[in-house]
Amino acid sequence: MIDQDRPAPTAVEAGDGAWPPELSRPAWTAENTVLRRVEPGDWEVILRLESSSPYQRAWERVTAPRSPDHCREWLKQEAARDPLDDNFFLAITDRRHGEMVGCVNTNQADPVAGRFYLGMAVAPEHQRKRYAWETGLLLFHYMFGERRYQKAQAYVHDFNQVSQAAMLAFGARLEGRLRRHDFIGGRYRDNLIFGLTSEEFYAGHGADGTS
């Protein structure tokens, strides 16, 4: 029962110990990485990523080049999305320099079933610097710990061994294979379906984000 003679404690003051570590962990910032909403000014980085055929093939499929105007307009729409929309597209940036090094998105977020799909890409020159790993941790902690989703899923092409290994490292399981699902590079490719439940993620990485 609250003492009527003094103000109610603030969220930080409540309790008799330090602020719980799982609540003091920044939602969008890691040791090397900061996630932010994309902006129209990011168009050059996006187009540079899209100019890489391996990027396009890993992300989905090779398309005709898009114009700067089209890219800016698309990013303008993404930047204006409601922050409470769980289908979002974020820039992966270097914490020290602020440089955009890649992007991550969620899609088909279903709050009733509690599941969502994700995709991620880091520019070749910025790979193997923990950006992708830290981005995954931030994203899963947010969707599981703040938005109450219970499962993440990802489609990964059969030739994309790096992304397959990353999903397994986060604790995901291979749940299925869609045979001859996409036509890429002159042949039909299988698409692998990975699933990661919140329990599987926290069993390996904890609620306090210290992994």
Image (cartoon, helix red, strand yellow):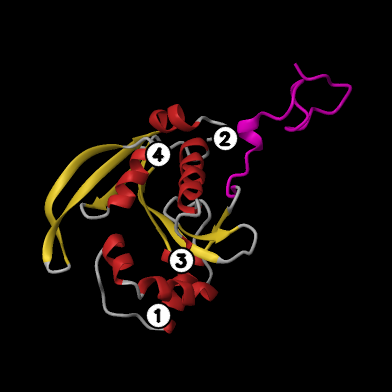
Going from N to C along the chain, the mark reached first, 3 or 4, is 3
Secondary structure predominantly adopted by residues drawn in magenta: loop
The residues bearing labels 3 and 2 have C-alpha atoms spaced at a distance of 27 Å
Task: Give the quarter of the image for residue 8.
Answer: top right
Going from N to C along the chain, the mark reached first, 4 or 1, is 1
Going from N to C along the chain, the mark reached first, 1 or 2, is 1
Q: Please, what is the three-letter code of the amino acid marked with disc 3? A: Glu
Q: Please, what is the three-letter code of the amino acid marked with disc 4? A: Phe
Residue 86: x percent and y percent? 44, 50
Task: Give the quarter of the image for residue 15.
Answer: top right
SS of the residue at dot 1? helix
- Is 21 colored magenta in this rendering? yes
* Residue depicted at 52% across the width and 45% down the height: 138
Which residue position holds label 4?
170
Q: Badge 4: few (under 14), some or many (20 or more) residues near its Cα, within 10 Å?
A: some
Res. 184 visible in picture: yes
Which residue position holds label 3?
125
* Residue depicted at 15% across the width and 57% down the height: 189
> Is residue 109 placed above or below 36 in the rendered structure?
above
Magenta-tinted stretch:
1-30
The residues bearing labels 4 and 1 have C-alpha atoms spaced at a distance of 35 Å
**Number of numbered tags placed on the structure image:** 4
Residue 210, label in figure: 2
Which residue position holds label 1?
70
